[in-house]
Image: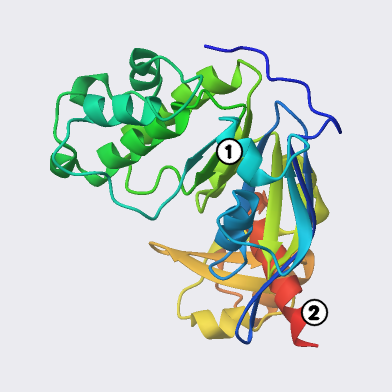
Amino acid sequence: MTTTPTPVPDGAAVRLTGLHKTFGEIRAVRGVDLLIAPGEVVAVLGPNGAGKSTSIDMLLGLTRPDAGTVRLFGVDPVRAVQAGRVGAMLQAGALLPDVTVKELVTMFAGLHRHSMPVADAIDLAGVTDIAGQKTQKLSGGQAQRVRFALALTPDPDLLVLDEPTAAMDVEVRRSFWASMRRFTATGRTVLFATHYLEEADQFADRVVVLAGGVVVADGTGAQIKARVGGRTVSAVVDGAEPDDLAGLPGVLRVDRQATRTLLHCGDSDGALRALMARYPQAHDIEIAAGNLEDAFLELVATSRQETAR
């Protein structure tokens, strides 16, 4: 297994510059710039329709941008993929049927000039126990792990993952990320899109937030959380309707957890004063610092407001 990525001319593993992509009247991507250094683990977050999958397709050379450029290790994505420097695990596409997992991984390894040993790819992806199973007999989570093994077969310097833990249960997700730590410990670069915000917070060096086809935040999880001053006010508020609580000053969103109401706030002081003035019966009040989910929601909401203007 290669442990040191080949040096690149401009020092970047991924360089996206001014990417635009339109489908009919839909402006899916509206000027995405992104620079990823070799060895970084970067998570991409965004609501449905944010432009994540379209950006990944352009990054991999599956879709041509209407404007802008993509460079992977200093060359266009098709050349980087052909050279075996890129592995991808995408949501779309079925596994080849009527073959075992080992046969499928062996077949894919044969397509690459300098592939990872089949046994290593199977072990790293955590599919040794199902290597003899036919692909059509796999569960959704098992199929995802096999896709991971296939993405590893080129022994890539860059691994691109689109919702990699979809359909995995909690135990398998933990095993998957343990495998990812082993992979990234060799100095490889990883870009993954996810809806699981805790995964981004725990496993990424950087978090990039897309909304409306543009990058609205780029930094460590801590830096992004620090960009928004949000806090969560948790209380038991008997007789209060969620819509009424959502209208309180400083409240961004309202959730319910059993008997408790969670007010996700941009201004927790103002929200708490308004809550107590309107609902003096509120009790068991707690205030917690905002998390990545709160920051994500506020950034997306702000982006939508600016786009609507």
Eyeballing the image, is 86 above or below 39?
below
Q: Amino acid at mark 2?
A: Glu
From the viewer's perspective, is 229 left or right of 279?
right
User: Image point 27% across, 45% down: which residue?
Assistant: 95
Question: Residue 229, located in which quarter of the rendered image?
Answer: bottom right
Q: Nearer the viewer, residue 150 or 213?
A: 150
- Label 1's element? helix
From the viewer's perspective, is 64 left or right of 106?
right
Q: Amino acid at mark 1?
A: Val
User: Image point 60% across, 16% down: which residue?
Assistant: 185
Earlier along the polypeptide chain: callout 1 or callout 2?
1
Q: Are marks 1 and 2 in contact (CB under 8 Å)?
A: no
Question: Residue 300, located in which quarter of the rendered image?
Answer: bottom right
Q: Residue furthest right?
A: 10
User: Image point 78% across, 37% down: which residue?
Assistant: 74
Q: Position of residue 11 (x, y in %)?
A: 84, 30
From the viewer's perspective, is 28 left or right of 38?
left
Q: Position of residue 171 (x, y in %)?
A: 33, 32
Indicate which disc residue 81 carries: 1
Q: Quadrant of the C terminus?
A: bottom right
Indicate which disc residue 111 carries: none
Q: Position of residue 302 (x, y in %)?
A: 75, 72
User: Image point 39% across, 33% down: which residue?
Assistant: 150
Indicate which disc residue 306 carries: 2
Mark 2 nearby-residue class (10 Å; few <14, some 14–19, many ≥20) = few
Q: Nearer the viewer, residue 202 or 87?
A: 87
Eyeballing the image, is 236 above or below 69?
below
Mark nearer the viewer, 1 or 2: 1
